[in-house]
DNA sequence: ACCAAATACATAAGTTACCAATGTATCTAT
DNA sequence: ATAGATACATTGGTAACTTATGTATTTGGT
């Protein structure tokens, strides 16, 4: 069992949450922030992140803005109004999921 | 995003945990107990459960005993000594995972 | 001045833990 | 009788990842 299998499905709510808290962020920044906030526990691979961001943009959940820092391109993402709704829903699901997991983690209590 | 993607990887630690708490259980019983303890949130499909149980047995983590209730076969599983070790490790990983998720769920605190 | 590491984007192929569907058979309750 | 619950199992498909690879710019150390 790969320990990493655990956070399958968590990436999307995490990204949406961060974008709700920070208005606009770019891909690399998102990976760094997740790594930092989780003390190195969650490391988002590029192969997971970029396809996800593209999909979310396509779905109208994110809106992208390309900017240049010197000659280097940087793509900022922010939540659309549809994205805010999606974020709340996704985060609620994640919270429920965690709560449910804890039901199983704790010994039965009367 | 399928909400069910969330608990990918959680099934194994959950099953191992239940088997540690209850000494011996059979497949159908496991599905019922998870459903009950999570108030219907987690529903384990047979296509996920039985292959997992078989794999864990093959890996020497579980030991199976076939019994008959009338004419109906029932396969009890229990943790081997290797299984107890695996259970503790898996559960620790799950706990860490939940903790890490909560790091991201809560707003940054100084 | 040089080069490794960091920054920043991206895609393609492979993995795997699950779901949905299907199958078989027995037992129970109405 | 027969629908639903109990109890096992397998097959085929999927989606969200990982690993590997690619390109290019910028920064920092010696």
Image (cartoon, coloured by chain):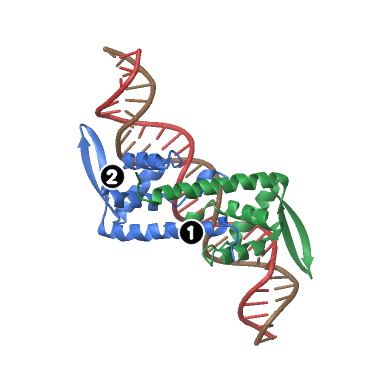
Chain colours: A blue, B green, C brown, D red
Q: For the residue carrying disc 1, how many other residues have a C-alpha within 10 Å: few (<14), some (14-19), or many (20+)? A: some
**Residue A73, position in %: x, y?**
24, 37
Q: Nearer the viewer, residue B23 or C12?
A: B23
Task: Return the residue at label 2.
Answer: A25
Q: Nearer the viewer, residue C4 or A35?
A: A35
The label nearer to you, 2 versus 1, is 1
Q: Is residue B38 left or right of residue B26?
A: left
**Residue at image coords 71%, 58%:** B24
Q: Is residue C10 left or right of residue B27?
A: left
Q: Quadrant of the C terminus of chain A?
A: bottom right
Quadrant of res C25 = bottom right
**Residue A9, position in %: x, y?**
45, 52
**Residue at image coords 62%, 64%:** B33
Quadrant of res B11 = bottom right
**Residue at image coords 21%, 37%:** A68
Task: Return the residue at label 1.
Answer: A99
Note whether residue A6 is visible: yes
Measured Cα–Cα span from mark 2 to mark 1: 29 Å
Task: Check the image and report above or below for A1 versus B17.
Answer: above
> Closer to the N terminus: mark 2 or mark 1?
2
Task: Check the image and report above or below for B77 versus A74.
Answer: below
Q: Is residue B1 left or right of residue B87?
A: left
**Residue B57, position in %: x, y?**
70, 50
Q: Nearer the viewer, residue D19 or A11?
A: A11
Residues at marks 2 and 1 touching, judged by CB atoms closer than 8 Å: no
Note whether residue B2 is visible: no
Query: What chain letter is assigned to the residue under label 1?
Result: A
**Residue at image coords 33%, 39%:** A28
Q: For the residue carrying disc 2, how many other residues have a C-alpha within 10 Å: few (<14), some (14-19), or many (20+)? A: many
**Residue B91, position in %: x, y?**
58, 48
Q: Secondary structure at mark 2?
A: strand
């Amino acid at each position: 069992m790969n320990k990493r299998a655990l956070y399958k499905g968590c990436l999307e709510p995490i990204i949406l949450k961060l974008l709700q808290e920070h208005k606009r962020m770019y891909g690399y920044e998102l990976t760094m922030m997740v790594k930092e906030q989780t003390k190195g526990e969650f490391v988002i691979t590029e192969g997971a992140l970029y396809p996800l961001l593209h999909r979310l943009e396509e779905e109208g959940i994110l809106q992208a803005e390309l900017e240049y820092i010197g000659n280097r391109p940087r793509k900022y993402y922010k939540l659309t109004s549809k994205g805010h709704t999606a974020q709340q829903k996704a985060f609620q699901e994640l919270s429920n999921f965690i709560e449910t997991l804890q039901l199983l983690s704790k010994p039965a209590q009367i």
